[in-house]
Image (spheres, grey):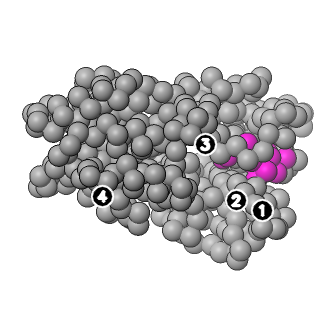
Amino acid sequence: MADATRKVAFLTPLYFDEASCIGGGERYATNMATGLVEATGGRYEVELISYGVSPARRVLRPGVSLRVLPVARRPSDPLDAVSWELPSAIADADLVHVHMAFSRSGEFGLLAARQQRKVVCASDHGGHSSWLGASLGSLELADRIVAYSSFGESLFRTPTPVVVIRGGVDAERFAPPEPRPRRDRVLYVGRLLAHKGIDRLIRALPQGLPLTVCGRPYDPAYFALLRDLATGKDVTFVTDADDDDVRDLYARAWCNVLPSVHVDCYGRRYRAPELMGLTLLEAMSCETVPIASRVAAMPEFIQPYQSGYLFDTPDELTALLLRLANEPETVERIGREARRQVLRAFDLKVAGAKLAGLYDELLSASTLSRGTIAS
């Protein structure tokens, strides 16, 4: 008889949707849910559980659904949303995976799941709205921590075992178009925040090279700074792009640059500016050359001079931009290798298969443990 479908609850305070916050952390949960279902042929199904003003349920794709629980209060930080309906919402789950573990939402999810004796995994996506749980050892409530880079793994201080599963990009959706339009620009895709280092990119941009900056401006003062820096240069800002628009921009770009920093232009320090860099992987999947600053996790995903480039100084970035704008053969060669690397190591089905292996191990151990106790 075929094995019964296993149900996994992904708990995430924000979800990837126009009505919620859009960023790599939110898309990551949806991508991993899709990868898990597709890699296992439906042996797993995933319900993403999040929060909003009004309850809602809908199917996102076969085997993946979204459930929005009514928020108990309107927190000042959306990562701290909780709902008193969460315990009943996870009651029929075989395994609970808590995303954004360092938030009030994550802390409550860990407690609710462990109280019901669920198998529990936890992940950190860089949104740290609460350190209360971490100071009390909340990660010890999880059976495994799932990080998506070795850099991310190094940040955890817990006896709970940590597993690294890199990637999670949708290589079918982010694929090079046929025929490909003419490449004619430098590109940045991501949130418009100071730790992303977009000001460095604009300053390093050579005169005469077009740059498209695509993302939502979450910090009005920083957005104003970027517009001032762009004066006199060929810089276009796109703040309302959907997935199709972003894919078209990847197709038209020589390169996609992620110039994130540990210290921003205001002197503020960031311990973990990038735990992965999902837009780099999306660009690579579209055969667009990735360029990243040599900080945090990004060097783990680029093979220098083979599938992309890393830089340390603004002058190095300027030289790379000029080279790619003038060497179409280099752009095509490295772009092709970048996509091959994604398909081999970072596609959501590859990551989903690894996640399924972890879940299988934990659920089997849980079944054996319960059987031993019962006997």
Whether label 2 touches label 4, CB < 8 Å = no
Callout count: 4
Whether label 1 touches label 2, CB < 8 Å = yes
In the rendered structure, which amino acid carries the disc numbered 1?
Pro
Q: Please tell me which of labels 2 and 3 falls first in the chain.
A: 2
CA distance separating discs 3 and 4: 29 Å
Whether label 1 touches label 4, CB < 8 Å = no
Residue 104 included in the magenta stretch of the image: yes
Residue at (51, 38) in percent of width and height: 265
Residue 290 included in the magenta stretch of the image: no
Q: Please tell me which of labels 1 and 4 falls first in the chain.
A: 1
Say which residue label 2 marks. 78
In the rendered structure, which amino acid carries the disc numbered 2?
Pro
Closest to the camera, between mark 2 and mark 3, is: 2
Q: Please tell me which of labels 3 and 4 falls first in the chain.
A: 3
Q: x, y (%) of residue 220?
A: 53, 59
In the image, residue 69 sits, relative to residue 237, either above or below, namely below
Mark 4 surroundings: few (<14), some (14-19) or many (≥20) residues within 10 A: some
Say which residue label 4 marks. 236
Labelled disc at residue 125: 3
Residue at (33, 51) in percent of width and height: 230
Whether label 3 touches label 4, CB < 8 Å = no
Q: Classify mark 3: helix, strand or loop.
A: loop
Q: Please tell me which of labels 3 and 1 falls first in the chain.
A: 1
User: The magenta stretch spans which residues?
Assistant: 99-111
